[in-house]
Amino acid sequence: MSRRPTLSDVAREAGVSVSTASLAFSGAGPIADQTRERVHAAAATLGYAGPNALGRQLRSGRHGIVGVVIGDKVKRSFRDPVSIQMLDGLVSTLSELRLGVMLIPGMEHDETGAMKVDPLLETSGMDVAVLIWGAHLDDPRLEVLRRRSVPVVIGEGNPSPGCSLVAIDDRRGVAELAEHLYALGHRRVANVTLPFRMGRQAGWIENPRDEEIDWTPTRNRLEALEESRLDVVATYETPASLVESGADAARQILDPARWPNPADRPTAIVAQSDLLAAGVVLAAREMGMRVPEDVSVAGFDGVTLPWLGTDLLTTVTQPLEAKGEALGRAVEALLEGRGVTEVVLPVELRVGTTTGMPPVL
Amino acid sequence: MSRRPTLSDVAREAGVSVSTASLAFSGAGPIADQTRERVHAAAATLGYAGPNALGRQLRSGRHGIVGVVIGDKVKRSFRDPVSIQMLDGLVSTLSELRLGVMLIPGMEHDETGAMKVDPLLETSGMDVAVLIWGAHLDDPRLEVLRRRSVPVVIGEGNPSPGCSLVAIDDRRGVAELAEHLYALGHRRVANVTLPFRMGRQAGWIENPRDEEIDWTPTRNRLEALEESRLDVVATYETPASLVESGADAARQILDPARWPNPADRPTAIVAQSDLLAAGVVLAAREMGMRVPEDVSVAGFDGVTLPWLGTDLLTTVTQPLEAKGEALGRAVEALLEGRGVTEVVLPVELRVGTTTGMPPVL
DNA sequence: CTGTTAGCGCCTTCAG
DNA sequence: CTGAAGGCGCTAACAG
């Protein structure tokens, strides 16, 4: 026969029953050493490579797979080191639990411009789904998962009934950063924000309080800055956390034509991610400004950016791998029937070389 | 009953047989519209979310999962945009085939320093495995997969019997790049290479021909450069394709102390990846050298590096997404029983602003 | 310690 | 067009 050998083939070859053969592989029961050896020998002669995963899965009702929904296409999502480090922690943690990670691209606009949920999310078998970039209001992905009754862990988003949550204390982080700037003497700052919701363009925000902000990190960080003692004199929304977007924002914000009276100019730029901040630094230098002598720049995330050279970005560091691990633990809890969990991880201000005293006019 | 409803529950509710209910969902057979409606209605009242993946998988013998073996830990692998863009093409292609991608970290050194294959590779169910960074000699991962009789697609590596292969014509790319430099007037170049095999340290290579090179892209690109009309006066091996590694290499190579006679100094540095090349450019500038006036720099891959500012790296571009798609097609071919395939994709020289005429002494 | 039995949920013949 | 039956490969009771 040319078909792949099954456990019952092995059992027959070894002259034992199927269940005995099963025990010989799983080790989950009393079995004589000699019998086990005989079974393994039979397996070797038949070229049997161990219990078939499908049979075991059907039997156990478990896929051994966690679906990880990334924000977008792989390429765009993973240009952000934040996603990658988190994923690293998640994969390591789940790997120890014998769980594999299946990547599921987030939503995409189809030909007609409508949002479409990736088919994998609709049909593919998974024990738990992790939305690493949260869920927005009436998120169709969440609806699909609810219908399929797949348990969900949300990273970094709004709490959602029935879903576990892993968040960070970003409000506090931004508050500390604001205090740092205030203490240095800054009063007027510009804010380079993350996107407010899906499918946004870059641009000025006149009244941040009037905007609907559908993405939690954006809202938390923006509100925390507004609530600080600093005066936010300009808010520029970016379409994504990318170096280019940060550079674009800086070119707008630092344009001298925008500040007829130099005394109105912001003395610091707070970017809501390190990639954005890196773009701000690069663009500021291209425009002939020194950082931090002419303008201070701060970021958020605490990722390592080799290309800023010897500069160390002032930023709020979040524990990215721990966040990934926490997501993994939340998955574990759900699978063990321990139910929905919520965690908020701490962040920490890291003072680097890109913030200093404001320039004297 | 609190257990999840099954197809037979739905069939009972709808007053039809299981097989009829099955047809109502799969649409793979003749069924009366009215019957189908009745079945769907029953499903709705029971909260049945469609056929269970496990049952279907066992029945079909397919997992619907492709295991993608990345080089290392997620974090380290995905710092390289090359991996990410390839993965993007692969995920998109497989998603259309209704196949999910499961990430499998490559090998890791365990506590004792020995190589260990990730347990997911040993036990997790997958229809095909893709080794995106190839296989080395006596690769234990390949042995595991062979034993489990999982079909394998290799990206960018040595051909291996029984495995499909997707490669690029990197020898030709390097040859064209060498000609470009030669035509500009360069004669002496330094080579910043990718690692020769696993677990290497950074360092000078005195006699490249004497080294055992276990990784195909490294070997191809190194040999192609040696075979060109250029004189490779220095070879520096890096431990990984990273900006920092490129910068380290450049600091060594450009150290004036190394070239007592300036006429011996290489006038161009050829780095075997764009990340390495970016590091070379940054380090050269830190050392007060202009690129390309004082030293020309070229890379390989053709990825977009926002942080080189207005410079465009001279490089050999490879079609990364197409490579990912080709990997997906190779997977498809294996699953359709069309057997092992081999593809070599073309590359193209892209002349940017980092190469120019050699300096006049 | 080992064998027997009964499914896990589905799909696909094959009859009707 | 619909129903009945068998089996994909495995494991967990239970009985010996």
Image: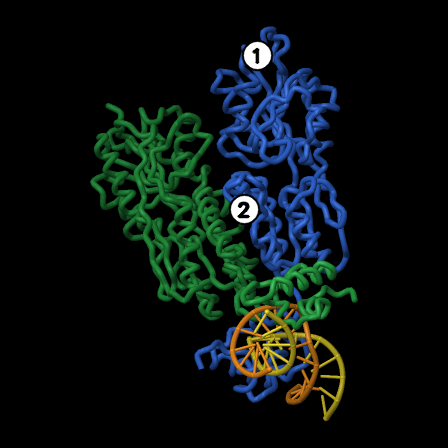
Chain colours: A blue, B green, C orange, D yellow
Question: Dot 1: what SS?
Answer: helix
Chain holding disc 1 = A
Q: Is residue A154 above or below residue A53?
A: above
Question: Could you tell whether B290 is left or right of A151 in the image?
Answer: left
Question: Could you tell whether B67 is left or right of A352 in the image?
Answer: left
The three-letter amino acid code for the residue at tag 1 is Arg
Q: Which mark is residue A258?
A: 1
Question: Could you tell whether B91 is left or right of A301 in the image?
Answer: left
The three-letter amino acid code for the residue at tag 2 is Lys
Q: Which mark is residue A231?
A: none
Query: Residue A200 location in percent, x, y?
Result: 59, 31
Q: Residue furthest right?
A: B1
Query: Residue B48 location in percent, x, y?
Result: 69, 61
Res. A339 image quadrant: bottom right
Rounded to the nearest whole Å, what is the CA distance between mark 1 and mark 2?
41 Å
Q: Which residue is mark 2?
A: B75
Instruction: Identify the residue at horizontal 31%, vertical 46% (top origin).
Output: B346
- Could you tell me if residue A126 is visible in this image? yes
